[in-house]
Amino acid sequence: MSLVIVGTAFTMVFTFIYYTIERETRMKIKVIFAILLSATLLFTFFGCSRNNATTDAKESPSSDVLGLSIREQAIEYVTQQLTGMKEGPPVIYETLGFTEIEIADSQLGNPFKIYLFDDTGQFFENSTENFVFPLVYQNDIIGIIEVAYLPDSGYESGFSFTFGKSFAEELSSLADQYKGDDLIIGNLSTRLLLAINGEEITVFVHNFGDNINKEQTTNVLSSIYSAIRNPDYFRFPE
């Protein structure tokens, strides 16, 4: 707006001077004025366009504005991703070991979180919101979809997305073992995946042959009661 006002004032002053000078000089000034006017209009156009783009990005409604929690946003996002896979070329998932019929007839299981524990078994807060979605086919878990909420990452959705078989087989066996119980899933020092039902711990994925010791078990069990509020359980229907 300020550029338009300055341009208007400049034009009025120029017009006054223009009609008080000789004809030959007018022609020279006319050319210079045309160049300056073109430059002013171009600068104004690109300046306004840039400001509008920034405003649109800030003011466009997000899921937070619409009242969706991060968990609800994650469900919406992963549902869209799974629909895209079903409608897309099979090569997208066949390279990961899935068949076309598995993906076409698959459903998303309930999302859960993986809670982090250090080497001693003490719980520590993850700075990033992460959710894990089992991919279910004929009542078996055949795949794992993991999303992380990264609002400052530059992703349009705010989420990163990974998909594969991962620990799907182990998780499916765990569901058979506990038959619909609510389980807290933990990650001990990035080496062990734990299933915790409040009284006991089952290590269902081992890395490097490690296992959990008595001290770690005690600390994990005490941590989940003192530090984790309203956990996002792994729930698999009977």
Image (cartoon, helix red, strand yellow):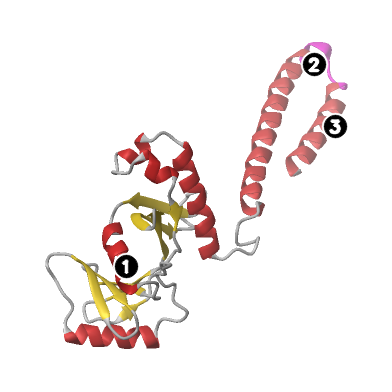
142 or 231, which is in the foreground? 142
The residue that mark 1 highlights is 176
Q: Quadrant of residue 23?
A: top right
As measured in the structure, the alpha-carbon distance from the residue carrying label 1 to the one carrying label 2 is 92 Å
- The quarter of the picture where residue 197 lies is bottom left
Query: With respect to residue 140, does 31 lie above or below?
Result: above
Q: Is residue 210 visible?
A: yes
Which residue is pictured at 32% across the width and 88% down the height? 222
**Element type where label 1 sits in the image:** helix
Badge 2 vs badge 3, beta-carbon distance below 8 Å = no
Residue 216 appears left or right of 92: left
**Number of the label disc, if any, that sits on residue 12:** 3
The first of marks 3 and 1 along the sequence is: 3
Expressed as whole percent of the image width and height from the top left, the position of residue 218 reads 25, 88
Q: Residue at x 44, y 76 (%)?
A: 231
Q: Which residues are magenta?
A: 19-25
Position of residue 189 measured from the top left corner of the image (x, y, whole percent): 23, 72
Percent position of residue 102, x then y: 38, 45
Residue wearing tag 2:
26
Q: Is residue 22 magenta?
A: yes
* Quarter of the picture holding the C terminus: bottom left
